[in-house]
Image (cartoon, grey):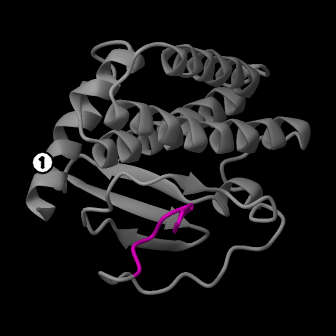
Amino acid sequence: MRATVRHGMTEGVVAYEEKPREQWLFDYPAQVALTCTQIWWTTEVGTAFARLEEGYENAMKDYYRKQVAQLKTLITMLIGPLSQGDRQKVMTVCTVDVHARDVVAKMIAQKVDSAQAFLWLSQLRHRWDDEAKHCFANICDAQFLYSYEYLGNTPLVSQPLDDLLPPPPTPLPSPSHPAAPFRPVLC
């Protein structure tokens, strides 16, 4: 199962830019699509920071506008006909995208102009290493190899106070404690 998830991510990360995101999303299982969107969020925010350093003052604002447009597209998709699994996948991506949009909005409001700012470093950031063909999860100064465990397709919940508290001590990754920015809803 882990090899299958890793293989899917290897393909998904590369294919992300090959077609519109709202089409690409249906080419991969939920966990792969969700993780790849998080990898690309980290990459695109990094690109915005690089553009800020080059002197383009609206780089982060431009990326924020892109995020809003992506969210509008996903919301439009939710209004239309979708299978139960696809609807859950799109809703889960929406949940993570709203959090990502809010992080970018907060960085704009606080005039964060460096990728070394704590506000950015304190986020769970996924990145893809092309050489190693692996996903890594970073938060603050910690880095963990993504475990590629199947996590299922369950709703996610971001608690309102999550962004007000400092990040918790990062536990060692284990099969029972995968690094995830949200908690599954337990019904």
| Range of residues picked out in magenta | 177-187
For residue 181, side relative to residue 159 (left or right): left
- The quarter of the picture where residue 56 lies is top right
- Which residue was labeled with disc 1? 7
| Residue 183 on the magenta segment | yes
| Residue 60 on the magenta segment | no
Q: Nearer the viewer, residue 181 or 17?
A: 181
Image position of 174 with respect to 181: above or below: below
Q: Give the class, few, some or many, for how many residues have Cα within 10 Å of label 1's Cα (few <14, many ≥20).
A: some
Image spot of residue 5 (x, y percent): 18, 53
- The quarter of the picture where residue 111 lies is top right
For residue 184, side relative to residue 128 (left or right): right
Q: Which quarter of the rendering shows the N terminus?
A: bottom left
Q: Secondary structure at mark 1?
A: helix
Q: Nearer the viewer, residue 107 or 97?
A: 97
Q: Residue at the location (60% across, 23% down)?
A: 71
Image position of 124 with respect to 63: above or below: below
